[in-house]
Image: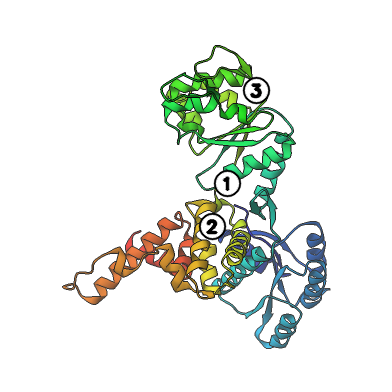
Amino acid sequence: MEKCRVLLVEDDRTQRELLTELLEEEGFSVTSASSGERALDLFRKEHYDAVITDVRLPGMSGLELLQKLKELEPAVEIIVITAFSSVDDAVKAIKMGAFHYVTKPFEPEVLVNLLRKACKLRLLSKPSRECCGLVYSSKVMENLINQASLFARSDAPVLITGESGSGKELLARFIHRESGRKGEFVAVNCGALPKELFEAELFGYEKGAFTGATSSKKGLVEEAEGGTLFLDEIGELPLELQPKLLRFLQEGEFRRVGSTKLRKADVRIVAATNRNLKRMVEEGKFREDLYYRLSVLTLNIPPLRERPEDIPVLIEHFLRKYSEKYSKEVKITPEALELLLSYSYPGNVRELENLIHRLVILSRGEVDRALLTSLMNLPSPSTSFTPDLSKPLPKVIEEVERAMIEEALRRANFVQTRAARLLGIDEKSLRYKRKKYGI
């Protein structure tokens, strides 16, 4: 996951070091500068999502720095720190495009919460990119697409790994498109075909090869001639069928079921799995030679929770897609958007798309937090447990609170900042409650 990159501008060394330490503990990537001139130099050389600057600086003032930074990068979010007696400076800063301001002295939590919101807005402003249905804005996905484009120029097999719903088939289609191969892209789910039919489906069969074979039929290999054969869920391929696939990969030759004639096919193989094939090899559930033949080139799609930068652009993409499909104008309230951005999406992009699809169908023009919470099945007192009416009310409230905290942590993969957002409380409060209940 890419951290939010912050440029901190503060001339007081002690204050600068304390703030840097605080923000890094909260998960931000911080670069500090002691003057506006130094900050401007750093900003020209590196990318930053947000800037925190004191108004009173030696040489160039914080307001001058704000103006120059906005000229260089209008979308950057800037938080201004000012003394209580200089609120006029803060008002000027807001008019000049600052995200917000804080007055000294301030609670660290106030600055951290503002910075989180600023970074989230920055994510929303990042441009999206789309390749063969893959929508993204993160650097990790950009690197993956570039690598896939490079692999596409080869005829070597490619193995794509990643969790269910992460977009493995879309990446395979991108590789096929980039390869320039003239044949078709043919996909087969290795886990969906009965093992008795797999060989016949893959390699075809001759008339009379088995009961019901009233005519000869091409297999998927022949259909993909000159193109790409995508073997999805390759980890589900039965062990006894793996040698036949291995022979085709090695020799490029096959026989239809019921035939003695050896045939050749020019087919690029791309396989995908959400399983750990190396472990399956160690357990004797997958052939080692087939594994190495399939994984000449490998690509791994990271889960959506590890690239949250892509969540905003995916939300926008799916919202536009389904709004157009149903001829509806649908908007998401800020509170609902906050929840969408903080959720971990164990089902990855597929889960997010299905959720937005349902939201568009059920909404009456606006998606609020209540509708979203009901569709996401977030914990509530009525569904997580049955209260014992013989217990005192404070005890029941504690049980509800504990149950909701445990469920939020589970859904957020125990990332405390995300769990706090799901619950609608700050992280400091969540830490206190976890300690209170021993969670």
Total marks in image: 3
Neighbor class of circle 2 (other Cα within 10 Å; few <14, some 14-19, many 20+) is many
- Kind of residue at disc 2: Glu
Q: Which residue was labeled with disc 2?
A: 353
Of marks 2 and 3, the one in the foreground? 3
In whole angstroms, how far apart are the C-alphas of marks 2 and 3?
A: 37 Å
Quadrant housing residue 32: bottom right
Amino acid type of the residue tagged 3 in the rendering:
Ala
Q: Which mark is residue 167?
A: 1
The foreground one among 67 and 62 is 67
Residue ID at (45%, 27%) = 197
* Contact? badges 2 and 3 (CB < 8 Å): no
User: Is the C terminus in the top left, top right, bottom left or bottom right quadrant?
Assistant: bottom left
Q: Which residue is mark 3?
A: 265
- Earlier in the chain: of badge 3 and badge 1, it is 1
| Residue 57 place in picture, x, y as percent | 77, 74
Task: From the top left corner, tell me how far across and down residue 342 is, in percent.
Answer: 52, 62
